[in-house]
Amino acid sequence: MPKMLDNILRNLFSKPATVRYPFEKPEHVPGTRGELSFDMSRCDQCQDCERLCPSGAIKVDVEGKRIEWDPYKCMYCHLCVRSCMHEAITPLDNVQPPGYRLEKKVFEA
Amino acid sequence: MNKQVEEVKTTVFPFGPQHPVLPEPIQLRFVVEEEEIVDVIPQLGYVHRGIEKAIELNDYRRNIYLCERICGICNYMHGMAYCESIEKLTDTMVPLRAKYLRTVWSELGRLQSHLLWLGLFSEGVGFESLFMQIWRIREIVLELNEATAGHRIHLSTNVIGGVNMDMDEGLVNRYYTDMDRLRKEMDTLAPVFYKDKAFQEKQVGKGVLPKKDAVHLGAVGPTIRGSGIPQDMRKNYYEAYGFLDFEPVTYDGDDVYSRTLVRFDEVYQSIDLIEAALKQMPEGPIVDKNDRFPDGVAIVRVEQPRGECFYYAVGNGTIHLERMRIRTPTLPNIPPLLHMLKGYEISDIPAIVHSIDPCMACAERITYVDKGGQ
């Protein structure tokens, strides 16, 4: 009984273990694998990222100098980030929020 | 009494593919005599995904991520087993530090899988507050995963020839403190598992799988260790397990309760192994790269949280593998499950089915289509 009382009192005054999601955003540690952003001034269209991408989420248009990235195909493995020789791909800390349409992100020079 | 009453009537009732107890779809048709189970007919094939064929069609370097998606819970060990098989085919020597890192992360995977199972099982036997407590503890491991590699479940740190992420001193210290926290939290729950009568009532003496049958039917993992046989693939000393001192956890009860205790004790064992591996971990390179294409035949066996996982790879010197065969631990555990269900009552089904930790989506490799006897 005293053990139970101890538990009850502790749980009454302790913080909740969960995050109240829509009102409170969960904190992400630095280094979370989030959205990608392509720096087209550094990119030389070598297509390494397109070749390596396991889910085929990146399309590089060499002549048009533009990159299409599909955030809904991407599995956020960041293989492209590590493989890019010019460090043109920088990962952001935020995680892609859910959307209504399957829109691709376009990066142009 | 007339004859009709004396005749025993059997009824067949379906359990699954969708059922609150089952995490994934499998149908078990129970032949019952009143409350007693006489026979069980399994039906698989609801989540066949053709992953072996996809591996054969894919570039072998991209397959690590595909293999990690075979099972979300044992993802790290699937990626590791695939990398090991390609390393055997290309004669790559993995650096020692990478071996230690792989050991640490696969034990971290085992921790989160066992904690997930302990929670789900407690919910399956009707102990919901225990389920919530265990999943709260599991957050420690998931946050550690996120701090290590950026994802809560999928570490994706394996590459062929080693690993692609290193641990600095701050992270190693965080591992030590979090493992201490985890051990203390588990200690608070230990009395429930070892002493609680209501919790034991649903497990002790249910789903008995004698030693002889466990071997004969080919059980693996905690299912066979719960029958008192110390079968553990980690004792084959892959990766850095050869440098670590441990003994497989076994219990002699042969029932659902001993399988629960095996998993509960393995949580402590994994914590100890992580701490020991971090202490011994040497400095050095973490990856060894080469340009050889896979050629030959390789067999890899790793111990996943559910048991032995078997990888068979055939390479022909090109960018594609010729054959890939993956046997996940749920498949060999299905015949023992059917055996241990017989003779028990309908109310025991959830506890017994849960006791093998069924993960159907990993296990399904073949779909049998019957076109009307053709």
Image: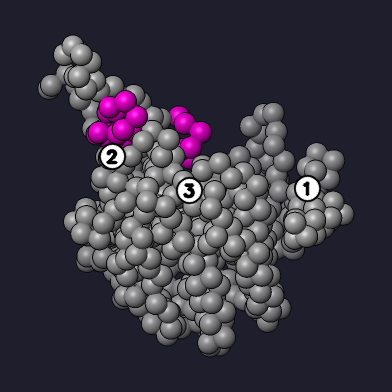
Find numbered disc 2 in the image and state the secondary structure of the residue it sits on. loop
Which residues, given as a range, are shown in magenta? B18-45
| Callout 2 crowding tier (Cα within 10 Å): few <14, some 14–19, many ≥20 | some
Q: Residue under mark 1: which chain is it in?
A: A
Residue B109 in the image: above or below residue B11: below
- Which residue position holds label 3? B201
Judge depth for marks 2 and 1 and give the one in front. Answer: 2
- In what quadrant of the picture does the N terminus of chain B appear? top left
Seen at 28% across and 39% down, the residue is: B343
Residue B119, image x, y percentages: 56, 50
Closer to us: A15 or B152: A15
**Left or right: B83 as drawn, with respect to B194:** left
Q: Residue under mark 3: which chain is it in?
A: B
Closer to us: A3 or B266: A3
- Number of labelled discs? 3
Residue B280, image x, y percentages: 53, 87
**Left or right: B64 as drawn, with respect to A89:** left
| Callout 1 crowding tier (Cα within 10 Å): few <14, some 14–19, many ≥20 | few
Residue A40, image x, y percentages: 70, 53
Please indicate, yes or no, whether residue B287 appears anywhere in the rendered image: no
- Whether residue A6 is in magenta: the answer is no
**Between disc 3 and disc 2, whose residue precedes?**
3
